[in-house]
Every structure is written in C-alpha cells, then in structure tokens.
Image (tube, rainbow, N blue to C red):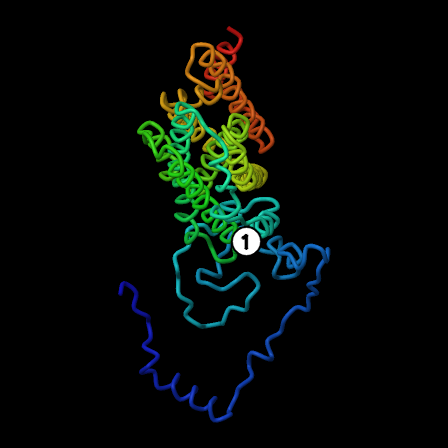
Amino acid sequence: MSYYGTNDFSHNSDFNLRIRDIKKGNLDFGWLDEARETVEVRRRDPRRGLTLEDCEVGPYAIDNTPEIVRENRGLAPRGAILAEGAEQPDLGPSLNKKTDVWGYRVQRYWEEAMSRQWNVSTDIPWQDMDKHEIPDDIEIAFCQLCTLLSEVEMIATDLPAKWSHHMNSYFQEVKGFIATQAIDEARHAEAFRKRALAGAGLYRASVRGEHALKGILEADSYSEGSVFLHVLGEGFILTLFRSSEFISPTPVEQRMFQLVMQDEARHVSYGLQHLKYLMDNCPEIRPQINGFLDEAERHLTGLFNPDQLESMIVLGGKGTSPECIRRGIEVVGAFQGKQIEEYFHRAERAGLPERRERSPLLELQQRMIAGVLA
C-alpha cells in the first residue's frame, strides 16, 4: 500500500467514543444547522429532464467559482462546505485554474454523451455482412484502414484518462465529460477491431503514425494535449470518418462510421470550446499554443503514411486497376485538402485565424489541391 492515512481511526479513542455516543442516540446535528444559500434548481425543459445547466445556480455555478481554486485540493464537489480546521487530504491536482480545462457549453456535451451511448455488438448490423460480396483488394484496403484507426482510437482513449485525476474536483463536468470520451474512444477501437476481424483481419501497424500520435500523449499541458487531440487530430479524423462513410464498401461500414462520427463531433466541439475559452480568458498563452501547433502539425503529417494513403486510394477508386487508381488519387487528394481546410476553419472559430498563414500544413494543402487539378 503506497498511501497511509495520517490517522488510524480504528485506534483513535476520540473518534470511537463519538461513534459510540451517536449509536446511543446522542446526536449532535451540527450539520443540520449549516448556513446555506437558498437556491432553486428546476427543470427548464421537461423534455430534457434535470440537466447540469439547470444546476448552475448560486454557489454551485462555475461562473461563481474563482479562476484559481485554492481552497480545495481534495474530493469535495463544487459548492460543498469545507470543514474548518480539518486536515483535508491533498490529492495533488495540478489543474486548478478554469482556463486549464474549462470549455464553453461543456455541460451540454456531458448530457449529449450520456444520452447517445451505443453498443458495438448490437447497433452495427453485423448480420448483414454476409449479404454483400466485397472484392479482396477492397476488403484488405478497408482492414488496413481499420488497423490505423484502431491505433488512433487507443491514443484518444489514453489522453483523457491521463489527465482526469490531475483536474481539481471543482471541475466535475470536465472530468465527467472526458471520462465519457475515454469510453467513446474505447468503443471506437472495439468497432474497428471487430470489423477487421470479421473480414480480412488486421494489417500493418503504422510506425510513422504512432510516432505522430505519441506527441499527443507527451504534451506538456492538458491544453496542449487537448488542442492536439481534439482540434487537430480528431478534427482530421472526423473528416476522415465522413469520407470513409462515402467510400465504405457496404451499408454495414457506413452505419459504423455514422455512429463513430456522432461521438467524434462531440469531442471536437469540446476541444474547440476549450481552446476558445482559453483564448478569450488567457490571451497571453497564444504564442505558446501557436508554437506548440507548429510542431504538432508537423507530427500529424506522419498519419499520411504510405500504407494508409494507398488503402484510401484503393477504397476511393474502388479497385486496383489503373483507372481505379487514378480516380482514387483524385478522391483522396480532395479529401486531404478538405481535412486541412476544415482544420483551418476550426482554428479560426476558436480564435486562432493565424494558423492558416503560419501552418506547415499550408504547403501540404497546396500540393493536395495541385494533385487534384493536375
């Protein structure tokens, strides 16, 4: 056991005597007399039930919480009465500023995540796979794509899990939301693994891709990890999911991408709102975030690895003949250009319009467009 309490309550005479008194009926009722601000928490929309936004009142509201949380380093939820003079355990949260983690509308993302959970085993029509005959080259290309996506989803599971316990318990909504993200991403990895194993199997793991993804996990701060994962990485993957739905070989895969997209869009939205909140309330961090993104964008080009690129070309062109390859190159060039353009648009919405001009992705975007027009 690595943690030993400061008090052994089983041998604390004062504590044990008080427990005996209570069991004899000698109650103190001090907790009944605590002065509390009267608040009214009611459903604003009966159709949605009682939401976290409905609970944003009085001392329980995040808007009434100071930027830096100093008084609580334990497990007390926001708005609870902290015992005076008591030695509260210090759990060592390193993320104690709202700007470290908070994002606009995070309560809504929690509610959406809880209401839109789905099951890989039963919500994807696996029973329909036998109804479709997929050519071998298309099937193998799709399984190569599923292999890469399994790697991507693993890092997207690990990042929120890594940072959750570093967050102050006053930021319960963010801690809860990124817990749902970890579940979502694990479910996505399950979906891509199952689809590959139900077909041609898993294919080549991506060394370059994994080096790119490691940069997400090794970010120095939560905000840097979030902007890399949510805004840049998952933004690219969201566009990939949309394109993959379009080039999926059967309705089974189309349904799979529809389900993972609804989760991914929510994760990207939180990342955008966190970045926007950070830019609005801590503008002095802009040079740091821009410098980090300069390097993160270079990392991300590793996802454009040859195996992934070729498999997407085969899927986009629907075969390996010269004509199919030509058509696939056009499809993938347009898709990659769209990935980069949508990323620039998201960065602008979050308050970083300068990404378009300073990004190393700009040259890649121009090459993608030139390839399509050639």
Image quarter of the N terminus: bottom left
Residue 289 in sight: yes
- Badge 1, how many Cα within 10 Å: few under 14, some, many 20+? many
Residue that extends furthest to the left in the rendered view of this protein: 1
Image location (x, y in percent) of residue 66: 56, 54
Pick the residue in front: 192 or 197.
Answer: 197
32 up-or-down from 293: above or below: below
Residue 66 horizontal side relative to residue 38, left or right? left
Q: Would residue 205 be found to the left or right of residue 261 on screen?
A: left
Q: Position of residue 76 (x, y in %)?
A: 49, 64
Front position in the image: 12 or 217: 217
* View extreme (top): residue: 374
In the image, 314 versus 297, the foreground residue is 314
Which quarter of the figure has residue 30?
bottom right
The type of residue carrying mark 1 is: Glu
**What's the residue at 55%, 25% (across, down)?**
344
**Image height of 81 relative to 266, above or below:** below
Q: Residue at x 44, y 51 (%)?
A: 164
* Image quarter of residue 311: top left
Would you name the residue on which mark 1 appears?
173
Marker count (numbered): 1
Q: Residue at horizontal 48%, vertical 20%?
A: 318
Secondary structure under badge 1? helix
